[in-house]
């Protein structure tokens, strides 16, 4: 299946089991390829990609948020220069959200921008971060505060690669799909309340939510802000725990539970998260978490746009004082 995303630079998402082994059906071999992956991604996947092209190089970074750093970013740029990559060559992200953010930012800034291909290997990156063009690195414990909007040339989503994903990371990524259902697609949310998860439908419907929102607001000037539901508090918790103890989706889950005022919706969400073995409570010091919340890149001095969901499938943007968010912590 091919899905076209229409924005400043249109691109296709190829959603197909086994597509990672058929990249030559979509990409030619007349330029070089710099494959950025991490040490948690099975070597076999990088080799499958590399062996389909005559001039492909694999660059492995450490797994986790530690690689979304100036140091790793600089190391990637230096390696590209060492290999004398030109503006006609490309960067390939093969991994989860961290690899996608890092590789995308490298591609966006190397020689003012070269082509970027995204091959997401986690549920989180397949349902959410691999499309939309947000690329970034962290500064210390502050999430994504240096970055850009840079759309990929193509995205290849192969659900077969999820078979090697640890269960915790599998469920972590599905939180972003639950979020997509809460803010935009009631049917998607209800899929998670079924006894068996229809993962193909979940990934497809999540992509369609992201596509619909991004096409209407590529640079997050209005509607796209709804994709941040749960993230304002979630990012604060990630920073508080030094981007280490809790995974991104787990913190977003915590942020969603805390920001929802409707008791019925909150309880339905908690039941889903419990099936994912995600703890909806934590021992974070509210005052310390609030300090990180104040550093949120979406904040405008003492004001911030907060996403609220009072009805499943519908989100609204509410401007409020940052100090008013203390009560949710």
Image: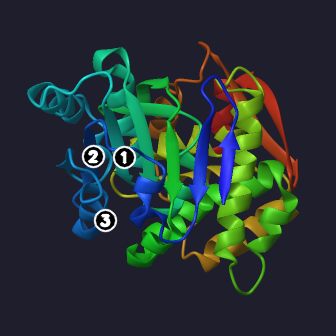
Q: Nearer the viewer, residue 235 or 226?
A: 226
Query: In the rendered structure, are the residues bearing label 1 and label 3 in contact, judged by CB atoms less than 8 Å apart?
Result: no
What residue does disc 1 label? 93
Q: Is residue 179 visible?
A: no
In the rendered image, which residue does mark 2 sit on?
36
Q: Nearer the viewer, residue 167 or 3?
A: 3
Q: Residues within 10 Å of mark 3 (few under 14, many from 20)?
A: some
Quadrant holding the C terminus: top right
Secondary element type, mark 2: strand
Q: Which mark is residue 45?
A: 3
Query: Pointer 1: residues within 10 angstroms few (<14), some, or many (20+)?
Result: many
Vertically, is 20 above or below 66? below
- Residue 236 on image: x %, y %: 50, 39
The residues tagged by marks 1 and 2 sit, at their Cα atoms, a distance apart of: 5 Å
Q: Tags 2 and 3 in contact by the CB under 8 Å rule?
A: no
Please tell me which residue is depicted at 45% across the width and 32% down the height of the picture: 135
Identify the residue at the far right of this view.
311
Residue 261 position in % (x across, y down):
81, 50
Q: Quadrant of the N terminus?
A: bottom right
Q: Residue at x 33, y 34 (%)?
A: 90
């Amino acid at each position: 299946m091919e899905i076209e995303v229409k924005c400043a630079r249109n691109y296709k998402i190829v959603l197909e089991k086994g597509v990672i082994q058929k990249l030559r059906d979509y990409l030619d071999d007349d330029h070089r390829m710099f494959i950025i992956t991490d040490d948690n991604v099975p070597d076999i996947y990088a080799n499958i990609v590399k062996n389909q092209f005559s001039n492909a190089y694999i660059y492995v970074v450490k797994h986790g948020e530690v690689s979304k750093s100036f140091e790793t970013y600089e190391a990637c740029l230096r390696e590209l220069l060492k290999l004398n990559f030109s503006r006609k060559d490309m960067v390939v992200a093969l991994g989860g959200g961290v690899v996608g953010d890092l590789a995308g930012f490298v591609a966006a800034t190397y020689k003012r921008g070269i082509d970027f291909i995204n091959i997401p290997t986690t549920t989180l990156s397949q349902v959410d971060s691999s499309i939309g063009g947000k690329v970034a690195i962290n500064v210390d414990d502050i999430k994504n505060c240096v970055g850009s909007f840079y759309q990929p040339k193509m995205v290849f989503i192969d659900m077969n690669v999820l078979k090697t994903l640890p269960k915790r990371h599998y469920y972590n990524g599905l939180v972003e799909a639950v979020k997509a259902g809460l803010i935009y697609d009631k049917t998607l949310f209800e899929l998670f309340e079924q006894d068996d998860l229809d993962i193909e439908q979940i990934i497809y419907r999540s992509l369609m939510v992201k596509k619909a929102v991004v096409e209407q607001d590529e640079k997050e000037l209005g509607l796209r802000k709804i994709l941040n539901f749960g993230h304002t508090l979630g990012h604060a918790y990630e920073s508080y725990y030094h981007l280490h103890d809790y995974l991104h989706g787990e913190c977003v889950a915590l942020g969603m539970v805390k920001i929802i005022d409707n008791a019925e919706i909150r309880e339905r969400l908690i039941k889903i998260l419990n099936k994912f073995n995600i703890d909806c409570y934590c021992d974070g010091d509210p005052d310390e978490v609030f300090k990180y919340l104040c550093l949120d890149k979406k904040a405008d001095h003492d004001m911030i746009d907060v996403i609220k969901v009072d009805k499943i499938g519908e989100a609204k943007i509410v401007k409020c004082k940052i100090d008013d968010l203390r009560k949710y912590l």
